[in-house]
Amino acid sequence: QNLPVWIESLDLDAQGIAHRADGKVVFVEGALPFESVNVNVHRKKNNWELGTLSRIHHESSQRVKPQCIYFGLHSNACGGCKMQHLNPSAQVAVKQRVIEDNLWHLGKVKPEFILRPIHGLDWHYRYRARLSVRYVRKKAKVLIGFHERKSSYVADMSTCRVLPDHLSQLLLPLRQLIGSLQVRDQCPQIEIACGDETTALVLRHLAPLSPTDIEHLHDFAATYRVQWWVQPKGIDSIALLSANEKQTEPSALFYDLPDFDLRMFFRPVDFTQVNPAINRTMV
């Protein structure tokens, strides 16, 4: 069904929200507020329908060209980002409006005063991330990245615009590293945490690392100046991979708060804001 609709607003899943003449809500993937579009409806319920943008008749002034080649509506697009087609300032406004609407609809609360939204970096801001790892045996290939849209498959990506540049450049070397490990098919994820001077990588492994595996991790750490943490079981099992003769003693993760003359230390699994600029502003 190719349905013409007018997009009224956007939800936090970056779906345009429209209403049919009979009052039924239509969620449109890829559409933005104040756009006149056609939607291909592929799922119907009693009170709502879900579809994908098929044509734009009137385009929003806030629509921008996505900067990442892996972003999009196609089935194997990366699902790590949802709003790259929307101006960054407009993204913040949308999120604020959703919060206001939820406060009212769920709690009947209206704030008397709203502070200005906090802005951080638009790109290369994600100083914390959990990357999925998948060894594709049939292709003898390792994939590392975020999941594909609405899928458990790992997106085939070699760069990432939201990760810090030095981490984006590590995606391909990390593929090679995992492919060299004897436990390459038993490593489901790598968690990333960046401090002001240190980058920590937490390797989740479901089978014990061999001495050769550990040597490969040490070599990678020395070459790319990162520190490895390992997680053989639950979150309580996370531990720093001890240094060897190829490494200096690893430095701790921290971020500075110059206004308060404070240095905040943290472990890679401790909570900090994803965006370091927002982290400092909020503190």
Image (spheres, helix red, strand yellow):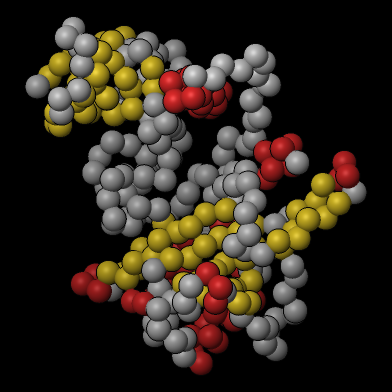
In the image, residue 53 sits, relative to residue 58, either above or below, namely below
Residue 193 screen position, x and y as percent: 61, 59
Residue 113 screen position, x and y as percent: 67, 15
Residue 246 screen position, x and y as percent: 68, 85
Residue 64 visible in the snapshot: no
Front residue of 238 and 6: 238
Residue at 40%, 83% (x, y): give it.
207
Residue at 52%, 62% (x, y): give it.
191
Residue at 33%, 57% (x, y): give it.
154
Quadrant containing the N terminus is: top left
Left or right, 254 with reference to 141: right
Residue at 57%, 53% (x, y): give it.
128
Left or right, 138 with reference to 122: left
Quadrant containing the C terminus is: top right
Q: Quadrant of residue 251?
A: bottom right
Residue at the limit of the structure toward the top, as seen here: 21
Residue 57 screen position, x and y as percent: 26, 10
Residue at the limit of the structure toward the bottom, as seen here: 211
Q: How many marks?
A: 0
In the image, residue 186 sits, relative to residue 50, either above or below, namely below
Front residue of 251 and 101: 101
Residue 146 visible in the snapshot: yes
Residue at the limit of the structure toward the left, as seen here: 1
In the image, residue 235 sits, relative to residue 132, either above or below, namely below
